[in-house]
Image: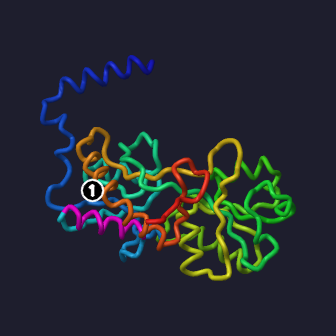
Amino acid sequence: MKPVASALIAAVLLAALPAAAQQTSDLVSKTAFRVCADPANRPMSAEDGSGFENRIADLFAADLGLPLEYTWFPMATGFIRRTLAENRCDVVIGYAQGDELVLNTNHYYTSAYVLIVKTDGPLAGVTALSDPALQGKRIGVVAGSAPATHMVRHRLMPLAKGYDLFVDRRYQDPSGDMLADLEAGEIDAAILWGPIGGPMVKSGHPGLKATPLLAEAGQPRMFYRITMGVRQGEKAWSRKLNSLIRRDQGKIDAILDDAGVPLLDDMGTGLKDLTP
């Protein structure tokens, strides 16, 4: 079916619904701030409340004067369908901008993939995958992630070690395994999404350093803007969250910076200026 025809049919079906059914914002709870989250997606979210997304959820619940309630589900295939779409919760605290499964709020931070190496090792000064120092090195990378394409471009894949992307993190920890392999010398460097790798290095791996990969040319891009995700059509709720993001941006930045998340400017070209 052509896109235009599909859009027309959708419009006709929407017009045929009762007005109350079109007001999807009515699904948003008035008695609790209901968050959809992975119970074991550290350092972002955790059932014990220790993740930096948990801290942001705490902040917003306090702003709204509502108790915080979680719906826990592994962040894998079916996450949105089994949580937000089933009206079991009203917001996903961290969601990449542009995903059609949700309505995105304004972004509240921008981050990038990081190269992680030993602080006192021969790769400590590397800032780009094009650096000749990486040739002949074994690099850990999440299979199917954006950095893998750049590694192919720079002929770094033949010796690479892949780690799974879609796992139930209650039982598997590919990011932790990657850093353990780096410390053990099984790999020479690791590439992780910054909001995962940065906090992990800061909190539990003092002998490692994480460097944002800001100089990678071509596609896919290595930085992403992170939003909150709500149900499609819930524009009033999205605007409410946007208002809270604007008001609390300084507090959000402080939470992310304290956690070790590398924060970039909106264009992903440099580190964000956090000067008050």
Front residue of 132/84: it is 132
Dot 1: few (<14), some (14–19), or many (≥20) neighbours within 10 Å?
Answer: many
Look at 54% across and 79% down and name the residue there.
203
Q: Is residue 52 above or below residue 2?
A: below
Residue 43 at x, y = what percent? Answer: 48, 71
* Foreground of the two, 11 or 250: 250
53 falls in the magenta region:
yes
Rendered image quadrant of residue 125: bottom right
- The answer to which image quadrant residue 132 occupies is bottom right
> Is 242 placed above or below 64 here?
above
As drawn, is 115 to the left or to the right of 199? right
Q: Which residues are magenta?
A: 52-64
The stretch drawn in magenta includes residue 205 = no
Residue at 42% of width from left, 57% of height from top?
94
Name the foreground residue: 100 vs 6: 100
- SS at badge 1: loop
The residue drawn where x is 27% and y is 45% is: 239
Magenta stretch, overall SS: helix
Please give the residue where the numbered disc 1 appears in the rendered image: 89
Q: Nearer the viewer, residue 187 or 209?
A: 209
Image coordinates of residue 255 in percent, x first then y, are 42, 69
- Residue 102 on image: x %, y %: 37, 44
Q: Is residue 179 above or below residue 244?
A: below
Q: Quadrant of the C terminus?
A: bottom left
Residue furthest front in the image: 276
Residue 159 position (above or below residue 227): below
